[in-house]
Amino acid sequence: MKQTDVIVIGGGPAGLAAALAAHRGGAQTLLIEREPRLGGILKQCIHDGFGLVRFSEQLTGPEYAERDIISFKQAGIEALTTTFVTRIKKTATGFILTAVNETGVLTITAKALVLATGCRERTARQVFIHGTRPAGIFTAGTAQHYINLLGQMPTKKCVILGSGDIGLIMARRLTLEGATVLGVYEAKPTPSGLTRNLYQCLHDFDIPLYLSQTVTRVYGEERLTAVEVCAVDENMQPIAGTGQKIDCDALILSVGLIPENELAVSLGVELDPKTKGPLCNEALMTSVDGVFSCGNALHVNDLVDYVSESGERAGTAAANFSCKQRAEIALTADANFAYLVPQRLDLNDIDTKTIIYFRSQRILENCDVVVTVNKQEVLRKHYSHLRPPEMERLEVDFATLNLTSDSTLSFKMEVR
Amino acid sequence: MKELICILCPNGCALSVADDQSELAVTGQKCKRGQEFAIAETTNPTRTLCTTVKTSFPEMPVLPVRSATAIPKERIFDVMTEINQILVTEALSSGTPVITNVLGLSIDIITTASLENTH
Ligand code: SF4
């Protein structure tokens, strides 16, 4: 049986940052990745725009990943690639992990775990579309995998449903490679992706964006031949009589991402219904002692820089982990918040700098985020706008606030 | 008056460019890079082109590349045609030019990942 201090599961940007931080924190660290190459989803994100916060440069996904992979290899951290974790058991002193790879079944023990398992895309099953189930319906990430890793074009003429960033990026990518993107259809009245992507991916290539419209039906027996699009009302219900049939050979879905937490759930980790990721404290420790979460497994990020940041935090905390009593209080947020991470603060382990990530539930202009302790205002920060597609980051010093287990710590948004 | 979005950072500031007496007045930027962007976008819009080239390696049949600096926007499809003719047969590392001075634009097309990283 192999023994280590920290096991990091997932070799994308969060896992690489976590493993490096754990290693630098003095822990013997092992990283497990199911794919043959490290880098996670960044391998197929060949567009630029990564790393502005962390490296003050606009890097492509593979370039961003390579920087971490080089540091990781230079540090001499062990990685098991093409290795699948099949089971994790919690014991009195840590964890026993079972994994398989071409050498057979491995059993490894560790004192702490970092789950950096990323996220997955919502699929056709999670979107309600009538009709047959022909080939030619895939997620934007799958299309990206085909084109950018396998060099195969999955469509000549397509419709994209959902205006998430990957969908926008793929609209441009498909167009560059000679496909026709007939339009991006978004059921919501506002786009989900970043404004810069609407501009440089759609506007640059004259690809139309249709808001408050959705795909209601697909046609075709073996291969998709057409889709029906329809206007929707404010409850996102199709409006009768607005249907329109559009000939195409593929429907590409960019309807959102969900944190991947199968392993976390198997360990009994409590999830936040808002983020769909684990409930965590400021050290990114989940409800299970010694299990840490980071990156897109924790909550879906829009910038990889913050994925790495959370990985680093989880890795550092995992290296320092020792089982002790927690005294956690909840961070509560009003209904203007789509979510807030971390959701808890451990008073036994309070730091002078707690990093808070949050998103607003709707578009808010000229507003303040206000933090109160027992209804007393302790912090106020002004934002010219808050938009759901844009994650915000806030640093708060909770150490000086004399918090006790009876304190009520609340976050609210106030429009000026 | 021209409306555009600054794409230099995720803030994506909405900029307006007013053409007053042969001078371009930019508003809406949160930082001064937005000003430069808006002027470039109005006079000579450029974009960094990111795509892939084919390789002869079955485990990595395509390799990501980009233009080393931004290229004129209206030349993007011409440059794509050039890039799509390339076949990489060596285990290049990232940052290696696969085309130098593409179409005489004084810009190289460079790899953004390493083929040797496969294993
Ligand atoms: S103007 Fe400055 S802050 Fe605004 S998007 Fe451009 S680079 Fe970013």
Image (tube, rainbow, N blue to C red):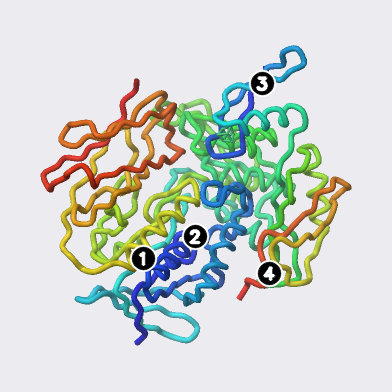
Q: CA distance from mark 4 to mark 2?
A: 19 Å
Residue type at tag 3: Val
Residue type at tag 1: Val
Query: Residue at the location (73% across, 49% down)?
Result: A177
> Dot 1: within a 10 Å radius of its alpha carbon, few (fewer than 14), some, or many (20 or more) residues?
many
Image vertical order of residue A360 relative to residue A46, above or below: above
Residue type at tag 4: Leu
Q: Position of residue B54 (x, y in %)?
A: 75, 63
What is the secondary structure assignment of the residue under circle 1?
Answer: strand
Mark drawn on residue A114: 1
User: Which residue is label 2 attached to?
Assistant: A13
Query: Which quadrant does the C terminus of chain A fall into?
Result: top left
Q: CA distance from mark 1 to mark 4?
A: 29 Å
Mark drawn on residue B17: 3
> Dot 3: within a 10 Å radius of its alpha carbon, few (fewer than 14), some, or many (20 or more) residues?
many
Q: Chain of mark 4?
A: B
Image vertical order of residue B16 relative to residue A280, above or below: above
Q: Position of residue B72 (x, y in %)?
A: 78, 39
User: Which residue is label 4 attached to?
Assistant: B115
Asked whether the residues under the numbered discs 1 and 2 touch, taking CB atoms below 8 Å apart as contact, a structural biologist would say no
